[in-house]
Amino acid sequence: MTTTLFRCQRWLTGFTTRIGQASAWLALLLVLGMVLVVALRYGFGIGNIALQESLTYLHGSLFMLAIAYTLAEDEHVRVDVLYQRFSPRTRAWVNLLGTLFLLLPLCAALFWLSLDYVLSSWREQEGSANGGLPFVYLLKSLLLILPALLSVQALSETLRQILVLLGHPVDAPTEHPEDHL
């Protein structure tokens, strides 16, 4: 049974990790787009609303698609005043209870409260009121994708904490070189 839990946990984390790593390329596109907007505006006196709105789409997409990856890498914000002093088992309990009673209900609420808003936008094929991009409904869809991806990673985190509580070693999130600066 623990082998199945371990495989499932690894697969779920791998799924959100691949999406997060792919979305990191949006940061490069965002920077290049910003350079283009500034160059066109101040170098040539050309303003383009659609190009400017595309930066908002990229920015929103970057954060909404990478948030589950941030959780998978344990890079999310946490108040470590007491947590850092806890034993691994106590940390597992804190993480498990926080995921079950805070994160998953938040994801469900975000999804439920956004559903009508997003569906309405899709029904209307909502576009920009300023003559920009005609795909506002796609941007709003991220309001459903975010809690879905975060729920997938929350399930993975739940499995990870259960495995820790059962006494089975679980790979820690990837260490980053800047952590040792």
Image (cartoon, rainbow, N blue to C red):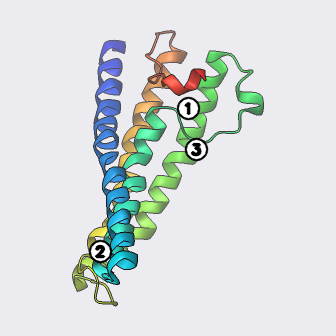
Across and down, in percent, residue 163 comes to 46, 18
Circle 3 residues within 10 Å: few <14, some 14–19, many ≥20: few
Is residue 115 visible in the rendered image? The answer is: no
- Of labels 3 and 2, earlier in sequence is 2
- Of labels 3 and 1, earlier in sequence is 1
Rendered position, 164 above or below 83 = above
Q: CA distance from mark 3 to mark 1?
A: 8 Å
Residue in the picture at 34% in, 45% down: 24
Circle 2 residues within 10 Å: few <14, some 14–19, many ≥20: some
Numbered disc in front, either 2 or 1: 2
Q: Position of 11 compared to 80: left or right?
A: left
Q: Residue furthest front?
A: 43
Residue 153: numbered disc: none
Of the pair 124 and 46, the residue shown nearer to us: 46
For label 3, the SS is helix
For label 2, the SS is helix
Q: What kind of residue is marked 2? A: Leu
Residue 111 lies in quadrant: bottom left
Quarter occupied by the C terminus: top right
Residue that badge 2 annotates: 51
Circle 1 residues within 10 Å: few <14, some 14–19, many ≥20: many
Numbered disc in front, either 3 or 2: 2
For label 1, the SS is helix
Rendered position, 155 above or below 44 = above
Residue in the picture at 27% in, 83% down: 126
Residue 101: numbered disc: 3
Quarter occupied by the N terminus: top left
Across and down, in percent, residue 80 comes to 71, 33
Marks 3 and 2 close (CB-CB < 8 Å): no
Residue that badge 1 annotates: 96
